Image (spheres, rainbow, N blue to C red):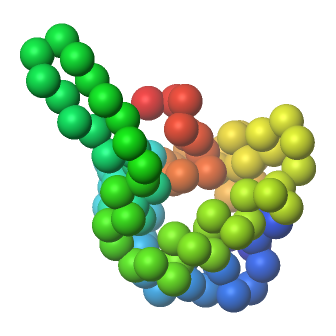
Amino acid sequence: MRSVPSIGPVTAAAFIATVDDARRFRHAHHLEAYLGLVPRESSSGDTQRRGPITKAGHSHTRWLLIQAVPAAPAGGGVRGWGRDGLGHGGVGVGERGRGGR
């Protein structure tokens, strides 16, 4: 976890304490939802309205992860982290990112 750019020891420890084993989430989106990092959605018929994040899950871990985003390098350096940083293709928020569902 600490190999991810902008993630320090406090954020890594909080993430691991909250999530325990990221492999229990089949897709990265499930982990994002568990942490409350997905937009709230209100749908009716063909209309979809997305609001602010749902804020489900552990608020301190979510806050730490959100604070780490401005410090991350430009160009999405976290996107391939799951494969390259850990040497495996396990599902995780760093591996798939938000666009890889």
Camera-nearest residue between 33 and 85: 33
Up-down: is 37 above or below 99? Answer: below
Quick check: 69 left or right of 37? Answer: right
Residue 100 visible at all: yes
Residue 31 visible at all: no
Quadrant position of the N terminus in the picture: bottom right
Camera-nearest residue between 101 and 53: 53
Quick check: 21 left or right of 96? Answer: left
Residue ID at (74%, 85%): 9
Up-down: is 18 above or below 6? Answer: below
Res 85 quadrant in image: bottom right
x, y percent for residue 44: 12, 24
Residue ID at (11%, 16%): 45
x, y percent for residue 30: 33, 50
Quick check: 74 left or right of 54? Answer: right
Camera-nearest residue between 58 and 52: 52
Residue ID at (43%, 49%): 52
**Residue with the most extreme right position:** 73
x, y percent for residue 41: 28, 39
Up-down: is 17 above or below 80? Answer: below
Res 83 quadrant in image: top right
Tag count: 0
Up-down: is 28 above or below 65? Answer: above
Residue ID at (40%, 78%): 58
Quadrant position of the C terminus in the picture: top left
**Residue with the most extreme left position:** 45
x, y percent for residue 17: 47, 86
